[in-house]
Image: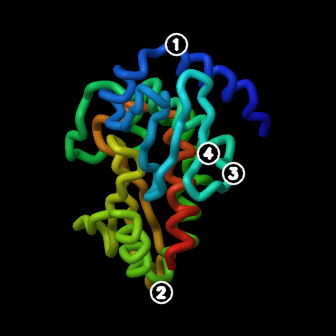
Amino acid sequence: MNLNPAHEVAVTEFAEKKPEDMALNSMAIYDPERKIFSLNFVGKEYFVHYPDGTVWMSEKDDVPQIVQILLLHYLTHAAPAQVQGKNISFKELPSGMIYVNPFTNRAIRPLVGIFGQDPSKLIQAGKSLGGEVTDMGDAAVTVPVLPKIPVTFVIWKGDDEFPPTGNVLFDASAAFHLHTEDYAWLPGLALSEMKTKV
């Protein structure tokens, strides 16, 4: 998939916004002297230079292009709205039905594939990223994927008749901070990191 056009648009939009406003709305930290944002994404610290949109990590690892795009989108689009503490499904996001198949393939199937046979590992992985146990399903954890974007991962154990199932839920404020298409990617990226914790 060619992400270059989306990346170019994300950088352009980012450069057009006032950094102080972006820092306030996204809860990222902005250093005006160095013109650098710092923010946590799935438990790791990332840095974004303003206005050119260069993204890097303290670990010196290369940052995947989709992560660069998501961080730029988050800084650019995050609104003053705060976390509401009410969960909604992906389908409840604006135009969520359009992206439900990519979301299922990138989020639900990996969730069940990684944690369906041993839901306790979901709790372990989520907690390692600063997540909190949530009272849903057979195991659930809410992970602070971005400062204003908690994501809840839920697993129901299978039995002799039914295979394990899972769901990924978002805070009701989610649509204020990212486009629905971004949420089709976000949980899968978090799950990739969670997989390394079990």
Q: Amino acid at mark 3?
A: Asp
Residue displayed at 55% across by 31% down = 49
Q: Nearer the viewer, mark 1 or mark 2?
A: 1
Q: Quadrant of residue 56?
A: top right
Q: Amino acid at mark 1?
A: Glu
- Which of marks 2 and 1 precedes in the sequence? 1
Instruction: Tell me residue 125's x, y (percent).
Output: 43, 72
For the residue pair 97 and 84, the one nearer the viewer reads as 84
Q: Could you give the CA–CA distance between mark 4 and mark 1, rounded to whole angstroms?
A: 30 Å
Of all residues, the one furthest to the right in this rendering is: 2
Q: Which residue is mark 2?
A: 160
Q: Could you give the CA–CA distance between mark 1 and mark 2, rounded to whole angstroms?
A: 56 Å
Q: Amino acid at mark 4?
A: Pro
Disc 1 vs disc 2: Cβ atoms closer than 8 Å? no
Element class at badge 3: loop
Residue displayed at 73% across by 34% down = 3
Element class at badge 1: helix
Q: Nearer the viewer, mark 3 or mark 2?
A: 3
Instruction: Tell me residue 169's x, y (percent).
Output: 37, 51
- Which of marks 2 and 3 precedes in the sequence? 3
Instruction: Tell me residue 109's x, y (percent).
Output: 57, 62
Of all residues, the one furthest to the front in this rendering is: 33
- Which of marks 3 and 4 precedes in the sequence? 3
Q: Nearer the viewer, mark 4 or mark 2?
A: 4
Q: Which residue is mark 3?
A: 62
Residue displayed at 39% across by 25% down = 22
Q: Which residue is mark 4?
A: 102
Q: Amino acid at mark 2?
A: Asp
